[in-house]
Amino acid sequence: MTIDLSAYSVRTDLALEARDLASSRGEIPGVHTSNFEQEGIKVSLIDITSQQGSQALGKLPGHYITIEVPALRQKDTDLQDRVATLFAQEFEKFLKKLNIAPDASILVIGLGNWNVTPDALGPLVVENVMVTRHLFELMPGQVSPGYRPVSAVAPGVLGTTGIETGEIVQGIVEKTKPGLVIAIDALASRSLERVNTTIQIADTGIHPGSGIGNKRKGLTVDTLGVPVIAIGVPTVVYASTIVNNAFDMMRSHFQKQTANTGQILGLMDGMQENERLQLVKEVLDPLGHDLLVTPKEIDQFIEDIANIIASGLNAAIHEAVDVDNVAAYTH
Amino acid sequence: MTIDLSAYSVRTDLALEARDLASSRGEIPGVHTSNFEQEGIKVSLIDITSQQGSQALGKLPGHYITIEVPALRQKDTDLQDRVATLFAQEFEKFLKKLNIAPDASILVIGLGNWNVTPDALGPLVVENVMVTRHLFELMPGQVSPGYRPVSAVAPGVLGTTGIETGEIVQGIVEKTKPGLVIAIDALASRSLERVNTTIQIADTGIHPGSGIGNKRKGLTVDTLGVPVIAIGVPTVVYASTIVNNAFDMMRSHFQKQTANTGQILGLMDGMQENERLQLVKEVLDPLGHDLLVTPKEIDQFIEDIANIIASGLNAAIHEAVDVDNVAAYTH
Amino acid sequence: MTIDLSAYSVRTDLALEARDLASSRGEIPGVHTSNFEQEGIKVSLIDITSQQGSQALGKLPGHYITIEVPALRQKDTDLQDRVATLFAQEFEKFLKKLNIAPDASILVIGLGNWNVTPDALGPLVVENVMVTRHLFELMPGQVSPGYRPVSAVAPGVLGTTGIETGEIVQGIVEKTKPGLVIAIDALASRSLERVNTTIQIADTGIHPGSGIGNKRKGLTVDTLGVPVIAIGVPTVVYASTIVNNAFDMMRSHFQKQTANTGQILGLMDGMQENERLQLVKEVLDPLGHDLLVTPKEIDQFIEDIANIIASGLNAAIHEAVDVDNVAAYTH
Amino acid sequence: MTIDLSAYSVRTDLALEARDLASSRGEIPGVHTSNFEQEGIKVSLIDITSQQGSQALGKLPGHYITIEVPALRQKDTDLQDRVATLFAQEFEKFLKKLNIAPDASILVIGLGNWNVTPDALGPLVVENVMVTRHLFELMPGQVSPGYRPVSAVAPGVLGTTGIETGEIVQGIVEKTKPGLVIAIDALASRSLERVNTTIQIADTGIHPGSGIGNKRKGLTVDTLGVPVIAIGVPTVVYASTIVNNAFDMMRSHFQKQTANTGQILGLMDGMQENERLQLVKEVLDPLGHDLLVTPKEIDQFIEDIANIIASGLNAAIHEAVDVDNVAAYTH
């Protein structure tokens, strides 16, 4: 099953954004959505159940959870704890929905590059995940109940290893035969406000070209032979995206303020979004402008969100780890 | 002598940008400029010699050197070595111009925060500066010729120390009585293409509100009692600045392409730059958009440019350190 | 008042060790000791109240607290929390004993070198101390009750700054006029088992030659004009010390096992401890053997103990910070 | 072919030490040794060509190079450059001796733990190795002559991944099919003076139980199916080893000084070395004494020696990289 996503020129790694873009054109068959909000944390569940829905969104059929926490960039440890707890609850439900057995062994893969702060999310999560697989191997029968075999690897990136991440992970999966792979990756965002405030969980795996790095091989049930849950957080945004979004915001700002229904942004008024984004890129590129950028405070943001995900994962995958004492297992 | 800079709403830490803004309105008395280019490195010298020039540029009277290297963000070690060498040569001339004695002791102050990558320039430079003052103190008369007493401190930032940086530096200057202070600081840029590609050297010191941090006390000859040379590198840029610059670029792009002398960017055509920037900020702010952002590759960029400055400083301030072997003293 | 400590050739930075060495020769006038143990944590209080006691121990008159936790090198977060709580309680009592006013401002000085792991204790503690002084300065009257003005600086070491740490601290004290200085330092231990398991608190300040670095100026009430509490943790030990201690242990091992009251360790039997240590150093030195060494796991140990001290300090110096929620303020 | 090494209770990872221990008992058949010295760098070549030689040394048959540089712990960048150059020359000869084709692809494995400084040698080398394999894969035929396909991975350690390192490496080797594996590992030393001063190169691979970590699966031609060159550097030493060595040194010190041929170290005089080491361990253990320790300056030492090995490797494995400009490729 392959779906041609190339028609969707305004690409996004987030199903939520794709749904918002598509649904502006009306109801979408085969796309089921629900959401709730809890003290500043918004959770959206999107299930894509048909080819038609998949085509409409430009996302693979599957289950998607999006956790949005606009206040996450303010250093608020209480909020962070609440997000970790909610992440754990949703992730546990997600595992049940996918029929992952409570004792299935899990391999956590932290994609990305240690030495590039906005790309270090995966390795940082791996560092704080409770690994137990070696205990099961070395002392079978002696591990306390409530734990399952968990292993965790940060395989590096193509530019520093010379090897496709997909190949390394395939090799490890073949040797260790986990029942599930969880892959954590930093994403490029379509909007500045999502950077370090949104977490997406999806059972569709990691696909070539997603994330910050240029992956050419995916991590999916097709390539690895086991289910793959992807956890992604937007940590960077293209300068051109910031500009393009700003044009939209300027226009709606003007539209609210003026009765003028004629010229608003002049020559740009008549452009399609894709056409305009293309133009913005062309204009910025010669000056070396079309950089991926990240907030100045990225060091702290990445550390905070990696702790949230690691804490949430530990509570969700080990029954014996409680969502209340989740913080004790990370640092 | 105080000059009211508040009238200049489009503030910039770079004299070169101020000169460009001001000179668009014609020749400026009391501002003398020269520049040369050498294999992709552009050096501009600006001397502001009168109150009139100072007012016109919104910068204090003094001497400014700007080194622009658009290709610096490409990891090119040869280019980096050439920039370090050129920096050393220009800095050495600068010291002579300011009549700093060859044996005057120097205190290097690395402003900024270790733990915030785009703000870590100062501390990183300090780490690679060759300090010798203690050798002169402990073994007077035994230090090899060609060195002068150099000390170096990274005093931290207000938010992590609870003390104005200016107070800490004053305390250290009073105790150690250097003949010159060199302060290194990361700056906020007015344009994305300057980020990590431009180095400014100025004999006007560091002023409240400049740089990334919120300094309320300056480091100047007035506050410290010794000459202060400031070395600054833009490492971050406001999202609003990126957007505002893009409007300009879009307009000139359209102007080149169309004979249309009427509507170009619609309602924005009639706005002053300040008015428009203000509007962009208003539009971005509610969404938490008006962040300071930095390129994704900031970890590497900061390390590279800190090495350039440290190497260049070591060669410029110690006669015995040659511009050719400058790299041997840093790592 | 100067006391010649040079007669005490087996130097130790810990009053507890000095007391143990001295008391083997009988009761010491002017030295008052008490101690208690609580779930694996041993607390000893030593007050040296007379010149005679001071001379006998080779330590300055003053108050000393020693917290010994042999199990601290095992990664046990529960134990770490209990040590932090007990540290906070004892430190609070200590402040009262010294008549430090509840609203006296405090300057925390983290001695040592960021880039040398076993010497990074002070800088790591400073990083996790809650600083508030700037809030009192910027918004007087608006800081919540239960806090006092606290500032914190890691001034670096002589080899990297070129300036005596004492001079830098003097400068800062003169500018900011705190009511109390707390200085944190890594120490060289006289015995391997103390490394990363013992914390000493003393009101005698930091003296030249103590700690790992070679300080030639002290941080004391005499040099700074305000009371100075020193917090020290042994993090390194000389190879010669390990060897010398082992000789003692071997001898008592043999003595327990044999009726032989004659030859035990042959020629070393007749030696004084100082004489023997001197010999061990002579034998090890030519081979470059007499290094300061630290346990392989030093990165983790230093982080753990720095968190304990920072958490304990935050709870002890800010009334509003509870010993129960102490961990929330550090990371 | 398996050789029981368990009889050799004084284990050492270094063939040179094993040879020295064994040769004290006379000439060893099947062990060929040569060595030379060059400006403070001593190079020893040991070839073990027979089972008899192997048994005598307790080391597998194969080729061993040992580079000893006692002055390496002094920060001397000139010396470091010379060691890197000599390492490159010897490594290049070694590749020829083993008949590794000039265009054979190489996989560099950095064993050990990023977060434990004395165990971070492997990951640090990997970070500075020039990887090229992806260029050959992505742009076949376009890579400049003089390079070969090189990949590099730091697979982590059992305690943090939950997976035997051997399994991970096997998986990667099966996927990428290199012609040679080079594995870099930190070792435990038998003597304090070797720590961070000695480099061993061997074509026998990495065996279970060697190195700092507790590997239970080896990296050898038998387990991986390709030749494995191991590069090891002692970075830690047991406290008991320091003590035991000191006893020997004390005894020979006394022997030189006295005519006394009777009692020297009393009861220890009659002990075999193994017996005595066992006793030292027993005596130290209850006190938690028998730690692995490392010099205080380990952060700098590890960085220096990792740079030497990475520079040397880059020059040796890529013909186009010259030993003279070797430093340009690392940082």
Image (cartoon, coloured by chain):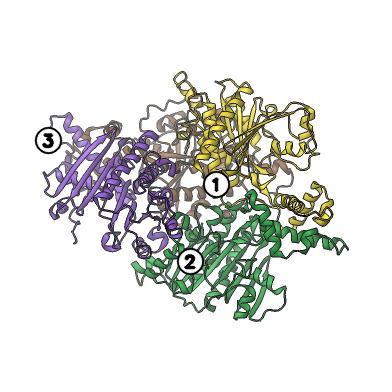
Chain colours: A purple, B brown, C yellow, D green
Residue D153's spot in the image, x, y percent? 44, 62
Residue C17's spot in the image, x, y percent? 71, 39
Residue A8's spot in the image, x, y percent? 19, 53
Q: Which residue in the structure is indicated by mark 1?
A: C74
D120 or B59: which is nearer to us? Answer: D120
Q: Are marks 3 and 2 on the same chain?
A: no
Residue D265 appears in the rendering: no
Q: Nearer the viewer, mark 1 or mark 3?
A: 1
* C23 in relation to B320, above or below: above
| Disc 1: host chain | C
| Disc 2: host chain | D
Q: Which residue in the structure is indicated by mark 2?
A: D217
Residue D32 appears in the rendering: yes
Q: Nearer the viewer, mark 3 or mark 2?
A: 2
Name the secondary structure under disc 2: loop
B324 or A146: which is nearer to us? Answer: A146
Return the residue found at the far front.
C259
Name the secondary structure under disc 1: loop
Query: Which amino acid is tagged 3?
Result: Gly
Query: Which amino acid is tagged 1?
Result: Gln
Badge 1 crowding class, 10 Å Cα cut-off, few under 14, some 14 to 19, many 20 or more, is few
Q: Which residue in the structure is indicated by mark 3?
A: A262
| Separation of residues labelled 2 and 1 (CA atoms) | 27 Å
